Image: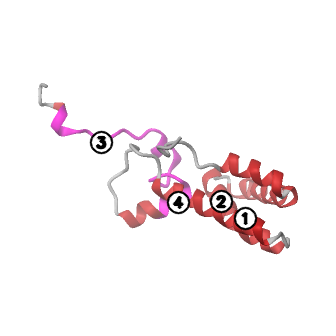
Amino acid sequence: YLRVSGGRGRGTGLGGLLALAPGLTTACVGIGLVLLALLRNPPLTSGVATVFLPLLSILLGEPQAITLTCIGLAVLVLVKRVVGNPGTAAVAQPWTRRLLYRLLFDRDVPGRRQWVFRRPPRDETRRGSGR
């Protein structure tokens, strides 16, 4: 838990938000499902829903405390997307492209298959050392 190597916290955040603002949570999940049906890309849909959560809170007239909570949740989820989990192998590419892919797709490459079937980079120092 404290090594921050788990998920993004979306389920926990939505569960807490459901207890605090059920109408907002239901609206957000409904919009997310519509976006998922249109985009057919769960990571992109999740990112878009995360960004729009605070805006939706303002539009629905939620109390300031709820809106600030939504902003905090969105920031935490987006930061976790950018940072990623420790030890995940990154594809060699410019950091700007990696940042964009992590924000949009929650991975280092645009294609799902390429990410799922990636191989860790070879460590040449250990491979032929005979130790």
Residue at position x 59%, y 63% in the image: 75
The correct choice, above or below, for 50 with respect to 86 in the image is below
The Cα–Cα distance between marks 2 and 3, rounded to whole angstroms, is: 33 Å
Mark 4, residue position = 79
Identified by mark 3, the residue type is Pro
Residue 125 falls in image quadrant: top left
Q: Is residue 56 visible?
A: no
Tell me the SS state at disc 3: loop
Residue 29 falls in image quadrant: bottom right
The picture places residue 66, in percent across and down from the top left corner, at 77, 65
Viewer-side label of 4, 3: 4
Query: Crowdedness of circle 2 by 10 Å Cα count: few (<14), some, many (20+)?
Result: many
Mark 1, residue position = 53
Image marks 1 and 2: residues in contact by CB distance under 8 Å: yes
The correct choice, above or below, for 30 with respect to 127 in the image is below
Identified by mark 4, the residue type is Val
Which tag, 4 or 2, sits closer to the chain's start?
Answer: 2
Viewer-side label of 2, 3: 2
Mark 3, residue position = 121
Image marks 3 and 1: residues in contact by CB distance under 8 Å: no
The picture places residue 105, in percent across and down from the top left corner, at 55, 56
The Cα–Cα distance between marks 1 and 2, rounded to whole angstroms, is: 9 Å
The picture places residue 130, in percent across and down from the top left corner, at 12, 25
Mark 2, residue position = 73
Query: Crowdedness of circle 3 by 10 Å Cα count: few (<14), some, many (20+)?
Result: few
Viewer-side label of 3, 1: 1
Identified by mark 2, the residue type is Leu
* Residue closest to the eye, 101 or 3: 3
Which tag, 2 or 3, sits closer to the chain's start?
Answer: 2
Magenta region: 100-126
Residue 126 falls in image quadrant: top left
